[in-house]
Amino acid sequence: MLSNYQGFERNKWSAPDTMRKLWLLFAGCASISVFLMYLGTKLISPFRGQNAYESKDVPSEITLAESEKPQVLELKISSLEEQCVGTASCREVLGQEPVNMERLELLRNVCEDASLKNVTYSGISRFVLDRIFVSDKYKILFCQTPKVGNTQWKKVLIVLNGAFSSIKKIPESLVHDHEKNHLPRLSSYRKPEVKKRLNSYFKFLIVRDPFDRLISAFKDKFLQNPRFEPWYKHEIAPAIIQRYRKNHTEVRGLQFEDFVRYLGDPNHRWLDVQFGDHIIHWATYVELCAPCEIKYDVIGHHETLRNDAPYILKKAGVDHLISYPPIPPGITEYNRTKVKQYFLGLSKRDIRRLYTRFQGDFKLFGYSKPSFLLV
Ligand SMILES: *[C@@H]1O[C@H](CO)[C@@H](O)[C@H](O)[C@H]1NC(C)=O
Ligand SMILES: *[C@@H]1O[C@H](CO)[C@@H](O)[C@H](O)[C@H]1NC(C)=O
Ligand SMILES: *[C@@H]1O[C@H](CO)[C@@H](O)[C@H](O)[C@H]1NC(C)=O
């Protein structure tokens, strides 16, 4: 197959006219079938089950031996200090260094807490490798945590990978189109290649207050649904309502209460499997990014993104190539009044169960327990 294909490519140039027509015909057929396959996966069967992970030849679980675990952190600090002598903007960026060190230390301590292991460890599964985007050119790994400004980070990486010359030039439709956006997932590499990247690349993720993120996911997917993703309202919402709605006289669409009961149910996996990858919008950071198993170099916080974004670019060694897009005022701050409003009227039992599931995310990343909701 492959050698025929290469021969075909060579002939293309020696007999340009006929081969060009054949090539166009072939490309036409190929794009039609790709489009039909796309329709098949997105519209006819929006639920990709867990077995979607089992068919590829990359192993389902990666484990790093103690000796393989990278010790790059300390080295990076001193090199940054050396780089920064004198310039004001550099000193400003360096101001984030102790903040990040504190976050990493907290993470390490919570990861070691044996009583929390059931909410802090998830394994470096295929699901996790699918969440991590790769820039081989600049040796960067970015773990995607939806509802935390990830689209912008994906655009940054797309530009770094060389597909477009600036963020403004990337068509909106292409950012999440993983066939075309030149942003490979870590899961697309073979096991030794995966390990090599996990051990040597610069790795980061961004988090925000876990309950605030769930509110954002609920609004974005079930109330507004700005992108054309009908399955959230027409497939997922009814499935959650059917299993979790208490008030049978309530006829409105998915309510935040239903959503919270689903997420806090210790048996939520029963539905998660049916929802496939769509759960990324409300799965925990632990499930998405395995922060206790993968040694991330920087943990950014959505709430302090204005400081964290330039720091991340600096640490990744790409700050002279690209800037994070301007952050509109007021969108990253935590709004306690809003969180309180959403949880108003929900039963304490449901909120406690939700917290039990998400407490790993609260503790690992230093978000305080929302006592105002729990007592
Ligand atoms: C059930 O839902 C209906 C319709 O929204 C509402 O009028 C009623 O108060 C609810 N009952 C309870 C017990 O919450
Ligand atoms: C916080 O949320 C409340 C309720 O949604 C809203 O009225 C208020 O303007 C928000 N505050 C800020 C600072 O955005
Ligand atoms: C984790 O284990 C603790 C006991 O060690 C238990 O109280 C808690 O409910 C568990 N959390 C989950 C989400 O299973």
Image: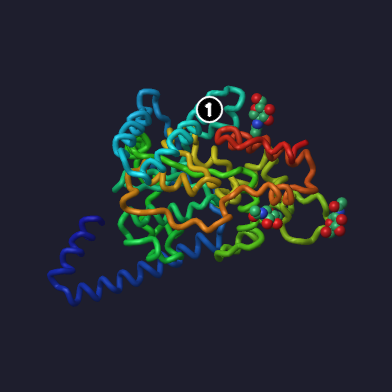
> In the image, ligand 1 is in what quadrant?
bottom right
Left or right relative to 252: residue 112: left
User: Which residue is pictured at 52% across the width and 61% down the height?
Assistant: 42
Q: Quadrant of residue 57?
A: top left
Reply above or below: 344 against 249: above
Q: Residues within 10 Å of mark 1 (few under 14, many from 20)?
A: many
Percent x, y of residue 27: 31, 69
Q: Is residue 127 visible?
A: no
Left or right relative to 28: residue 243: right
User: Of the residues shown, which amino acid type is indicated by label 1?
Assistant: Cys
User: Which residue is pictured at 25% across the width and 73% down the height?
Assistant: 22
Q: Quadrant of the N terminus?
A: bottom left
Q: Residue furthest left?
A: 14
Residue at disc 1, secondary structure: helix
Q: Quadrant of residue 117?
A: top right
Percent x, y of residue 95: 43, 38
Given residues 260 and 162, the one toward you in this image is 162
Percent x, y of residue 104: 48, 32
Left or right relative to 46: residue 63: left
Given residues 113 and 194, the one toward you in this image is 113
Percent x, y of residue 325: 44, 57
Report the residue marked by disc 1.
Answer: 111
Q: How is the image coloured?
A: rainbow
Given residues 22 and 344, the one toward you in this image is 344
Q: Quadrant of the C terminus?
A: top right
Q: Is residue 172 visible?
A: yes
User: Which residue is pictured at 20% across the width and 56% down the height?
Assistant: 3
The image shows a total of numbered marks equal to 1
User: Which residue is pictured at 54% across the width and 31% down the height?
Assistant: 121
Look at the numbered disc 1 and say if its residue's Cβ is closer than 8 Å to ligand 3.
no
